[in-house]
Image (cartoon, coloured by chain):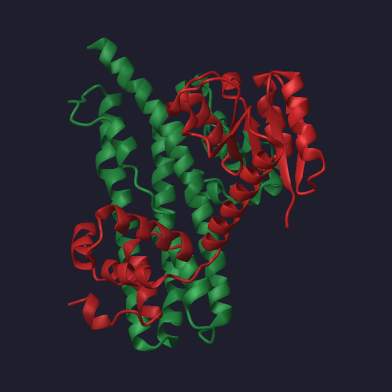
Amino acid sequence: MAELILSNPNLMLTLSRFGIELGFGDSLVKDVCKKTNVNTAFFLLICNLYTDSDFIPSQEDIKSVNINTLLSYLSQSHKYYVDERIPHIENHLNRIIEACPKKFGTTIERFFEEYKNEVKNHFCYEEETVFPYINSLCDKSSKRVFSINEFKSNHSNIEDKLNDLMNILIKYLPAEIFPKERIEISLDIVDLSSDLKYHTLVEERVLVPFVELLERQCHENM
Amino acid sequence: MKTCKIIIAEPSPIIAAGLCAFFEDTSRLQVLSVIDNIDNLHEKMIVYKPDLLIVNPLMIGLATNNIKQIAHNYPSTILVAFITTYIDKSIVRHFKETIEISDNKQKIINKIFNMLDSNDESSSQSDNFDLSNREIDVLVCVAKGMTNKDISDMLNISVHTVITHRKNIVKKTGIKSVSGLTVYALLNNLVDESEIYE
């Protein structure tokens, strides 16, 4: 396990979402997973996606996914972004905003406020519309009010605005405003957007094909 | 002046050799490879990344899609058609330039030079990251929350032109969202706070 994490430290972020705690010593991946009740195959699937962005899970991989594990993993990631990463960036940003001339400060504040809402709406939509739909498919109570295709086409891009913020911080904010703080916050943003990218990959390459499979099965049974 | 790297795709070895001979004593033009079979094209394109692909349209099959595919796969390469027989205009127009089998040496070289020069101009334009006055006009409107239609009416330009300006603004500033552009406009004192949020 330690070998795996050290070879790709990005994976560290996924651990807490699985409920895996650090301090696993020299245990094997399968032992750590067993201890925390995590499906080893699914854990490795996520590791693969995080390590190789061209990785496409096979049909067998998708079939063997346990939907509860997947949904709880995704919800945990959402929680992490909303409760930890974004407030962290906001704290940094607030210090920059305070140092800005007032009118710059206000617009940047508004900009970030808008971004926060966009992210919250994005996650809310997934948790309140998409996830319940998937659960209803699983216990076969679906009334087909929704389809994963809708999700596919609505899956908005929440990285654009982060990228915009980077451009503003790096290129356009006057040089004298908190240069050190700006470097730090920019690096935080880079981390967040790369993690968001992987998160999107998990949704697109695991969640969507899984639900498509379910939908087909439901259809056949009807 | 930069040398121009060329790949020639022509099934007839006589013609291909002739073209190479034309370019031989022009130091600005350098033929890297000659291919006589379309199957080798991809590999050579990847290895050599030529500036110019001179290709006989007969070789890539006379379908518009094939040409579009090539243009799409290798966006940094200019496509030139080498015409040995009658070829329909609908095919020819997908190429940046055409060379005909009856053209003499000087004419062929002039055609290529003209094309390279005009290409240099257009690429140096896009290296300029300052917004033009017109782009600033459009940016200000975008920051104020106007729609493309509103902007086209106000500036007396077509919606299509508005979209082109907006694309260039995004390309130059690196900022995609409207709210991001609003911040940009404010930071650069292009608009006043009171004009944006009422």
How far from the left and from the top, in percent, is residue A176?
Answer: 53, 87
Vertical comparison of A135 with B135: above or below:
above
**In front here: A136 or A20?**
A136
Residue at 50%, 57% in the rendered image: A192
Residue B56 placement (x, y as % from top left): 61, 25
Identify the residue shown where x is 71% and y is 20%.
B36
Give the quarter of the figure containing the N terminus of chain A: top right
Q: Is residue B38 left or right of residue B127?
A: right
- Quarter of the picture containing the C terminus of chain A is top left
Q: Is residue A88 visible?
A: no
* Percent position of residue B154, x then y: 19, 67
- The hue of chain A in the figure is green
Q: Quadrant of residue B53?
A: top right
Q: Is residue A46 above or below residue A170?
A: above
Residue at x-position 57% and y-position 65%: A187
**In the displayed structure image, the side of residue B145 where residue B19 appears, left or right:** right
**Image-quadrant location for residue B155:** bottom left
Tally the marks. Answer: 0
**Is A193 situated left or right of A22 in this image?**
left
- Front residue of A122 and A35: A122
Residue B16 appears in the picture as rendered: yes
* Chain coloured red in this rendering: B
- Name the spot of residue B162 as percent of width and height, x first: 30, 58
Residue extending furthest toward the top: A221
Question: Relative to the observer, which residue lies in front, B18 or A153?
Answer: B18
